[in-house]
Image (cartoon, helix red, strand yellow):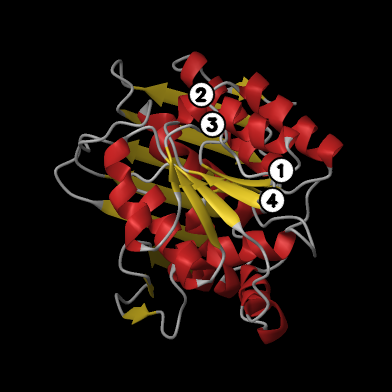
Amino acid sequence: MITYNSLFTCWKTIYRPDICNRMEHVIGVIGAGHMGKRHVRVSHTLGVLGPVFDTDPAAKAVAEQYNAEFFTDFKAFDDHLDAVIISTPPQSHFPLAMMAIEKGMSVLVEKPITIDPAEGERLVDAAKDADVSLAVGHVERFNPAYMMLRERIETPDYVLTDRHSPRPDRILGPALYDIGVHDIDLSIDLIGSDPVSMHSTMSENGEMGLLRFQFEDGASTVRFNRTSMVKVREVTVTKGNDVLTADIMHQGVYSPDGAFEKAENVMEPIEAEIRDFLDTMEHRKPTVCGDVGLRAVRLAHLAENRSGDGWIDLD
Protein backbone atom coordinates (compact mmCIF):
# COMPACT_ATOMS: atom_id res chain seq x y z
CA MET A 1 0.00 0.00 0.00
CA ILE A 2 1.34 3.40 -0.98
CA THR A 3 1.54 5.91 1.85
CA TYR A 4 0.88 9.52 0.91
CA ASN A 5 2.68 12.33 2.71
CA SER A 6 1.01 15.69 3.03
CA LEU A 7 1.19 17.61 -0.23
CA PHE A 8 2.00 20.70 1.79
CA THR A 9 5.13 18.89 2.97
CA CYS A 10 5.81 18.10 -0.68
CA TRP A 11 5.20 21.78 -1.54
CA LYS A 12 7.81 22.85 1.00
CA THR A 13 10.20 20.31 -0.47
CA ILE A 14 9.61 21.76 -3.93
CA TYR A 15 10.57 25.18 -2.60
CA ARG A 16 13.81 23.96 -1.00
CA PRO A 17 16.60 26.23 -2.28
CA ASP A 18 19.15 23.40 -2.42
CA ILE A 19 16.92 21.64 -4.94
CA CYS A 20 15.34 24.58 -6.76
CA ASN A 21 18.64 26.30 -7.45
CA ARG A 22 20.33 23.17 -8.70
CA MET A 23 18.69 22.51 -12.06
CA GLU A 24 21.34 20.28 -13.63
CA HIS A 25 19.10 18.13 -15.79
CA VAL A 26 18.14 18.51 -19.43
CA ILE A 27 14.59 17.59 -20.41
CA GLY A 28 13.21 17.06 -23.90
CA VAL A 29 9.56 17.86 -24.47
CA ILE A 30 7.58 15.60 -26.80
CA GLY A 31 4.47 17.33 -28.07
CA ALA A 32 4.14 21.11 -28.24
CA GLY A 33 0.36 21.40 -28.36
CA HIS A 34 -2.08 22.63 -25.73
CA MET A 35 -0.27 21.24 -22.67
CA GLY A 36 3.09 20.76 -24.32
CA LYS A 37 3.53 24.51 -24.86
CA ARG A 38 3.19 24.99 -21.12
CA HIS A 39 5.78 22.31 -20.40
CA VAL A 40 8.15 23.98 -22.86
CA ARG A 41 7.67 27.39 -21.25
CA VAL A 42 8.12 26.19 -17.68
CA SER A 43 11.08 23.95 -18.52
CA HIS A 44 12.74 26.94 -20.16
CA THR A 45 12.05 29.10 -17.09
CA LEU A 46 13.65 26.45 -14.89
CA GLY A 47 16.69 26.24 -17.14
CA VAL A 48 16.24 22.58 -18.02
CA LEU A 49 14.70 22.73 -21.50
CA GLY A 50 16.35 20.55 -24.13
CA PRO A 51 15.00 19.81 -27.61
CA VAL A 52 11.32 19.91 -28.53
CA PHE A 53 9.74 17.15 -30.61
CA ASP A 54 6.45 17.35 -32.54
CA THR A 55 5.23 15.78 -35.77
CA ASP A 56 3.62 19.09 -36.74
CA PRO A 57 6.26 21.38 -38.31
CA ALA A 58 4.18 24.36 -37.20
CA ALA A 59 5.17 23.57 -33.62
CA LYS A 60 8.69 24.72 -34.47
CA ALA A 61 7.56 28.23 -33.55
CA VAL A 62 7.11 27.10 -29.95
CA ALA A 63 10.67 25.77 -29.80
CA GLU A 64 12.08 28.89 -31.45
CA GLN A 65 10.31 31.11 -28.93
CA TYR A 66 12.45 29.51 -26.22
CA ASN A 67 15.62 28.97 -28.26
CA ALA A 68 15.23 25.20 -28.26
CA GLU A 69 16.19 22.71 -30.95
CA PHE A 70 13.22 21.27 -32.83
CA PHE A 71 12.73 17.82 -34.33
CA THR A 72 9.79 16.19 -36.09
CA ASP A 73 11.22 12.68 -35.68
CA PHE A 74 10.63 11.35 -32.18
CA LYS A 75 13.33 8.74 -32.76
CA ALA A 76 15.93 11.50 -32.94
CA PHE A 77 16.38 11.42 -29.18
CA ASP A 78 19.58 12.90 -27.88
CA ASP A 79 21.28 10.19 -25.85
CA HIS A 80 22.52 12.88 -23.46
CA LEU A 81 19.00 13.80 -22.37
CA ASP A 82 18.23 12.96 -18.74
CA ALA A 83 14.49 12.89 -19.17
CA VAL A 84 11.51 13.66 -21.36
CA ILE A 85 8.06 15.09 -20.82
CA ILE A 86 5.45 13.45 -23.03
CA SER A 87 2.46 15.64 -23.83
CA THR A 88 0.88 13.96 -26.84
CA PRO A 89 -2.47 12.24 -27.46
CA PRO A 90 -2.92 9.32 -25.02
CA GLN A 91 -2.76 6.69 -27.76
CA SER A 92 0.90 7.59 -28.31
CA HIS A 93 1.96 7.60 -24.67
CA PHE A 94 3.00 3.96 -24.54
CA PRO A 95 5.39 3.77 -27.52
CA LEU A 96 6.99 7.13 -26.77
CA ALA A 97 7.43 6.47 -23.05
CA MET A 98 8.79 2.98 -23.69
CA MET A 99 11.27 4.35 -26.21
CA ALA A 100 12.54 6.86 -23.66
CA ILE A 101 12.71 4.35 -20.81
CA GLU A 102 14.67 1.91 -22.96
CA LYS A 103 17.19 4.70 -23.57
CA GLY A 104 17.58 5.12 -19.81
CA MET A 105 15.58 8.34 -19.53
CA SER A 106 13.22 9.31 -16.76
CA VAL A 107 9.71 10.12 -18.01
CA LEU A 108 6.94 12.50 -17.03
CA VAL A 109 3.94 11.47 -19.12
CA GLU A 110 0.72 13.43 -19.18
CA LYS A 111 -2.35 11.70 -17.81
CA PRO A 112 -3.64 9.18 -18.51
CA ILE A 113 -0.46 7.13 -18.39
CA THR A 114 -2.07 5.01 -21.14
CA ILE A 115 -5.59 4.12 -22.23
CA ASP A 116 -4.86 0.39 -22.06
CA PRO A 117 -4.04 -0.77 -18.50
CA ALA A 118 -1.85 -3.58 -19.86
CA GLU A 119 0.37 -1.04 -21.62
CA GLY A 120 0.53 1.06 -18.45
CA GLU A 121 1.67 -1.98 -16.51
CA ARG A 122 4.42 -2.62 -19.05
CA LEU A 123 5.65 0.96 -18.65
CA VAL A 124 5.70 0.69 -14.86
CA ASP A 125 7.64 -2.58 -15.01
CA ALA A 126 10.07 -1.23 -17.61
CA ALA A 127 10.81 1.89 -15.53
CA LYS A 128 11.51 -0.24 -12.47
CA ASP A 129 13.79 -2.55 -14.45
CA ALA A 130 15.65 0.43 -15.93
CA ASP A 131 15.82 2.19 -12.54
CA VAL A 132 14.43 5.43 -13.95
CA SER A 133 11.70 7.70 -12.65
CA LEU A 134 8.21 7.41 -14.16
CA ALA A 135 5.82 10.20 -13.20
CA VAL A 136 2.28 10.81 -14.45
CA GLY A 137 0.94 14.32 -15.05
CA HIS A 138 -2.03 14.45 -12.69
CA VAL A 139 -1.37 18.16 -12.27
CA GLU A 140 -4.39 18.75 -10.01
CA ARG A 141 -2.36 17.22 -7.17
CA PHE A 142 -0.28 20.40 -7.27
CA ASN A 143 -3.20 22.81 -7.45
CA PRO A 144 -2.99 25.13 -4.41
CA ALA A 145 -6.74 24.86 -3.73
CA TYR A 146 -6.50 21.08 -3.59
CA MET A 147 -3.46 21.29 -1.35
CA MET A 148 -5.25 23.65 1.05
CA LEU A 149 -8.18 21.27 1.18
CA ARG A 150 -5.98 18.26 1.82
CA GLU A 151 -4.08 19.98 4.59
CA ARG A 152 -7.16 21.23 6.44
CA ILE A 153 -9.28 18.08 6.42
CA GLU A 154 -7.20 14.93 6.57
CA THR A 155 -8.71 11.52 5.79
CA PRO A 156 -12.26 12.77 5.11
CA ASP A 157 -15.17 10.36 5.36
CA TYR A 158 -16.74 11.55 2.09
CA VAL A 159 -15.39 13.12 -1.11
CA LEU A 160 -17.53 14.66 -3.86
CA THR A 161 -15.91 15.85 -7.07
CA ASP A 162 -17.50 17.81 -9.92
CA ARG A 163 -15.72 18.42 -13.21
CA HIS A 164 -17.83 19.91 -16.00
CA SER A 165 -16.84 21.76 -19.14
CA PRO A 166 -18.05 22.55 -22.66
CA ARG A 167 -16.91 20.11 -25.30
CA PRO A 168 -13.34 21.15 -26.17
CA ASP A 169 -12.02 21.77 -29.66
CA ARG A 170 -9.37 19.16 -29.03
CA ILE A 171 -10.61 15.72 -27.98
CA LEU A 172 -8.01 13.61 -26.22
CA GLY A 173 -9.87 10.33 -25.99
CA PRO A 174 -12.96 9.39 -23.96
CA ALA A 175 -14.06 11.88 -21.30
CA LEU A 176 -13.46 9.31 -18.57
CA TYR A 177 -9.75 9.18 -19.44
CA ASP A 178 -9.48 12.86 -20.35
CA ILE A 179 -11.06 14.39 -17.24
CA GLY A 180 -12.51 11.60 -15.09
CA VAL A 181 -9.14 10.11 -14.14
CA HIS A 182 -8.21 13.38 -12.41
CA ASP A 183 -10.92 12.94 -9.81
CA ILE A 184 -10.57 9.18 -9.46
CA ASP A 185 -7.01 9.92 -8.40
CA LEU A 186 -7.92 12.82 -6.11
CA SER A 187 -10.64 10.79 -4.37
CA ILE A 188 -8.26 7.98 -3.55
CA ASP A 189 -5.51 10.34 -2.48
CA LEU A 190 -7.86 12.16 -0.09
CA ILE A 191 -9.36 9.04 1.48
CA GLY A 192 -5.88 7.54 1.75
CA SER A 193 -6.59 3.96 0.69
CA ASP A 194 -7.73 1.93 -2.29
CA PRO A 195 -11.49 1.53 -2.87
CA VAL A 196 -13.09 -1.82 -2.11
CA SER A 197 -16.10 -1.48 -4.43
CA MET A 198 -17.31 0.72 -7.28
CA HIS A 199 -20.53 1.64 -9.06
CA SER A 200 -20.42 3.21 -12.54
CA THR A 201 -23.08 4.86 -14.69
CA MET A 202 -21.97 6.32 -18.02
CA SER A 203 -23.85 8.03 -20.82
CA GLU A 204 -23.98 6.16 -24.11
CA ASN A 205 -21.73 8.70 -25.78
CA GLY A 206 -19.22 8.50 -22.91
CA GLU A 207 -19.22 12.27 -22.43
CA MET A 208 -20.63 12.22 -18.90
CA GLY A 209 -20.67 9.81 -16.03
CA LEU A 210 -21.21 9.17 -12.34
CA LEU A 211 -18.77 6.97 -10.43
CA ARG A 212 -19.19 5.94 -6.81
CA PHE A 213 -16.47 4.37 -4.70
CA GLN A 214 -16.71 2.69 -1.33
CA PHE A 215 -13.64 2.50 0.90
CA GLU A 216 -13.02 0.75 4.20
CA ASP A 217 -13.23 4.13 5.96
CA GLY A 218 -15.10 6.39 3.59
CA ALA A 219 -16.80 6.92 0.25
CA SER A 220 -16.57 9.17 -2.78
CA THR A 221 -18.62 10.30 -5.77
CA VAL A 222 -17.02 11.42 -9.02
CA ARG A 223 -19.20 13.39 -11.45
CA PHE A 224 -17.92 14.52 -14.83
CA ASN A 225 -19.48 16.05 -17.93
CA ARG A 226 -17.71 17.17 -21.09
CA THR A 227 -20.87 18.65 -22.66
CA SER A 228 -21.72 21.22 -19.99
CA MET A 229 -22.51 24.86 -20.74
CA VAL A 230 -20.40 25.98 -17.77
CA LYS A 231 -16.99 25.11 -16.37
CA VAL A 232 -16.84 23.63 -12.89
CA ARG A 233 -13.89 22.00 -11.13
CA GLU A 234 -14.67 21.47 -7.47
CA VAL A 235 -13.79 19.00 -4.73
CA THR A 236 -15.89 18.89 -1.54
CA VAL A 237 -14.94 16.86 1.50
CA THR A 238 -16.66 16.12 4.80
CA LYS A 239 -15.38 14.78 8.08
CA GLY A 240 -18.01 14.62 10.77
CA ASN A 241 -19.59 18.07 10.75
CA ASP A 242 -16.67 19.70 8.94
CA VAL A 243 -17.22 20.58 5.27
CA LEU A 244 -14.84 22.28 2.87
CA THR A 245 -14.95 22.86 -0.89
CA ALA A 246 -11.93 23.50 -3.10
CA ASP A 247 -12.52 25.56 -6.24
CA ILE A 248 -9.78 24.16 -8.45
CA MET A 249 -10.33 26.70 -11.22
CA HIS A 250 -10.11 29.76 -8.98
CA GLN A 251 -7.50 28.26 -6.64
CA GLY A 252 -9.17 28.75 -3.31
CA VAL A 253 -11.50 27.11 -0.79
CA TYR A 254 -15.05 27.80 0.36
CA SER A 255 -16.03 27.35 3.99
CA PRO A 256 -19.61 26.25 4.90
CA ASP A 257 -20.68 29.90 5.39
CA GLY A 258 -19.73 30.67 1.79
CA ALA A 259 -16.58 32.63 2.57
CA PHE A 260 -13.92 32.19 -0.13
CA GLU A 261 -10.22 32.10 0.72
CA LYS A 262 -7.87 32.31 -2.22
CA ALA A 263 -4.50 30.64 -2.02
CA GLU A 264 -1.65 33.14 -1.90
CA ASN A 265 2.05 33.10 -2.83
CA VAL A 266 1.70 29.85 -4.71
CA MET A 267 3.55 28.24 -7.56
CA GLU A 268 1.93 27.50 -10.90
CA PRO A 269 0.79 23.85 -10.65
CA ILE A 270 2.63 22.74 -13.77
CA GLU A 271 5.85 24.27 -12.44
CA ALA A 272 5.39 22.47 -9.13
CA GLU A 273 4.81 19.25 -11.05
CA ILE A 274 8.01 19.61 -13.09
CA ARG A 275 10.04 20.55 -10.01
CA ASP A 276 8.66 17.47 -8.28
CA PHE A 277 9.73 15.39 -11.28
CA LEU A 278 13.23 16.86 -11.24
CA ASP A 279 13.53 16.11 -7.54
CA THR A 280 12.43 12.51 -7.99
CA MET A 281 15.20 11.82 -10.47
CA GLU A 282 17.61 11.83 -7.54
CA HIS A 283 15.76 11.89 -4.24
CA ARG A 284 12.46 10.03 -4.05
CA LYS A 285 9.43 8.52 -5.76
CA PRO A 286 7.26 10.98 -7.73
CA THR A 287 4.17 12.37 -6.03
CA VAL A 288 2.19 10.65 -8.79
CA CYS A 289 4.32 7.68 -9.78
CA GLY A 290 3.56 5.20 -12.53
CA ASP A 291 1.78 2.83 -10.16
CA VAL A 292 -0.58 5.59 -9.03
CA GLY A 293 -1.34 6.71 -12.57
CA LEU A 294 -1.92 3.09 -13.56
CA ARG A 295 -4.36 2.59 -10.67
CA ALA A 296 -6.53 5.45 -11.95
CA VAL A 297 -6.54 3.99 -15.46
CA ARG A 298 -7.45 0.51 -14.23
CA LEU A 299 -10.44 1.91 -12.37
CA ALA A 300 -11.45 4.03 -15.37
CA HIS A 301 -11.22 0.99 -17.62
CA LEU A 302 -13.39 -1.01 -15.24
CA ALA A 303 -15.91 1.84 -14.96
CA GLU A 304 -16.11 2.09 -18.74
CA ASN A 305 -16.64 -1.63 -19.26
CA ARG A 306 -18.95 -2.30 -16.30
CA SER A 307 -21.21 0.74 -16.54
CA GLY A 308 -24.70 -0.11 -15.34
CA ASP A 309 -23.64 -3.41 -13.77
CA GLY A 310 -24.30 -2.28 -10.19
CA TRP A 311 -21.76 -2.46 -7.40
CA ILE A 312 -18.51 -4.20 -8.34
CA ASP A 313 -16.22 -5.81 -5.76
CA LEU A 314 -12.65 -4.60 -6.26
CA ASP A 315 -10.89 -7.11 -4.00
Which residue lies under the disc numbered 2?
303
Q: In this view, does 263 lie above or below 236?
A: below
- Label 3: state its secondary structure: helix
Q: Which amino acid type is marked by label 2?
A: Ala
Q: Distance between the residues labelled 4 and 1?
A: 47 Å
Q: In which quarter of the image is residue 258?
A: bottom left
Residue drawn at (31%, 80%) of the image: 259
Could you tell me residue 218's position as x and y percent? 62, 48
Q: Distance between the residues labelled 4 and 3?
A: 21 Å
Q: Which amino acid type is marked by label 3?
A: His
- Label 2: state its secondary structure: helix
Q: Which amino acid type is marked by label 4?
A: His
Q: Which of marks 4 and 1 is nearer the N terminus?
A: 4
Left or right: 173 with respect to 215? left
Q: Which amino acid type is marked by label 1?
A: Glu
Which residue lies under the disc numbered 4?
80
Residue drawn at (34%, 46%) of the image: 163
Front-most of residues 42 and 238: 42
Q: Which quadrant of the figure contains the C terminus?
A: top right
Q: Which of marks 1 and 2 is nearer the N terminus?
A: 1
Which residue lies under the disc numbered 3?
93
Which residue lies under the disc numbered 1?
216
Left or right: 288 with respect to 225? right
Label 3 crowd (10 A; few <14 / some 14-19 / many >=20): many
Q: Distance between the residues labelled 3 and 1?
A: 33 Å
Q: Is residue 270 above or below residue 307?
A: below
Left or right: 23 with respect to 180? right
Q: How far apart are marks 1 and 2 (CA)?
A: 19 Å
Q: Which of marks 2 and 4 is nearer the N terminus?
A: 4
